[in-house]
Amino acid sequence: MYANILYPTDGSESAEAAIEDVRDLAETYDATVHVLYVVDTTHAGLGSDPDQEKAPGMVGHPEGGTAGMVGDRSTAEEVQRTLERQGESIVEEAREQLGDVDATTAVRAGVPYEAILDYAETEDIDLIVMGTHGRTGLDRYLLGSVTEKVVRTADVPVVTV
Ligand code: ATP
Ligand code: MN
């Protein structure tokens, strides 16, 4: 029924709270888990287009420890590489927590919900399991904005934890 399960994680506690369910579902359906981290390029100064205008601004998550001013291309590239490395350790850690479950990891760059939906389409994902909240984690919102957009627009079922 569910051969490929997508588990997008931003490394937050809220995302980590979903991992038990991810493992259970994968074991139940003998599925492969795809762990995905997206480097958020909506922050000023980051982007896949090298010619895009780089406005100085804050990058990185408030708790991510990488916040800083990005004023030129080489700094932006450095910040992006740092975030990619952080992403790689986040997805590796998740893979370890999945134990014997068949799992693959990916780090992409882009607008998080777009990259998640794009990954789901190109990798034949049948189920998405994600946190209700992420790094911002504001209780006054029912769902974080990434989850809200994925729930609203994904073609496959989405389990929010
Ligand atoms: P907001 O981002 O709207 O300020 P938030 O950070 O609390 O609020 P979301 O970002 O929607 O909430 O996070 C909800 C879930 O979405 C996370 O638990 C995680 O599963 C997924 N997610 C969020 N950001 C990313 C990301 N950059 N890469 C992969 N998955 C993500
Ligand atoms: Mn978020």
Image (cartoon, rainbow, N blue to C red):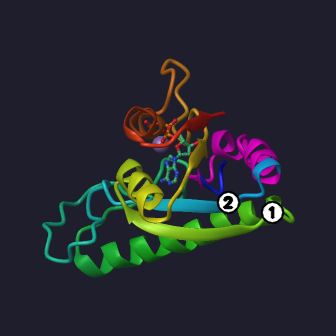
- How far apart marks 2 and 1 lie (CA) works out to 7 Å
Could you say which is closer to the camera, residue 22 or residue 133?
Answer: 22
Quadrant where the C terminus sits is top right
Q: Position of residue 8 (x, y in %)?
A: 56, 52
56 sits left or right of 35 in the view: left
Identified at 45% across, 77% down, the residue is: 81
Would you name the residue on which mark 2 appears?
33
Q: Position of residue 146 (x, y in %)?
A: 43, 40
Identified at 51% across, 69% down, the residue is: 107
Single out the residue that lies furthest toward the right.
Answer: 100
User: Which one is earlier in the sequence, the residue at label 2 or at label 1?
Assistant: 2
157 sits left or right of 13 in the view: left
Could you say which is closer to the camera, residue 54 or residue 40?
Answer: 40
- Amino acid identity at mark 2: Val
Label 1, secondary structure: give it. Answer: loop
Is the Cβ of the residue at disc 2 closer than 8 Å to that at disc 1? yes
In the image, the segment drawn in magenta is: 7-27
Q: Position of residue 85 (x, y in %)?
A: 55, 74
Task: Tell me which corner region of the image, top left, top right, bottom left or bottom right, holds residue 34.
Answer: bottom right
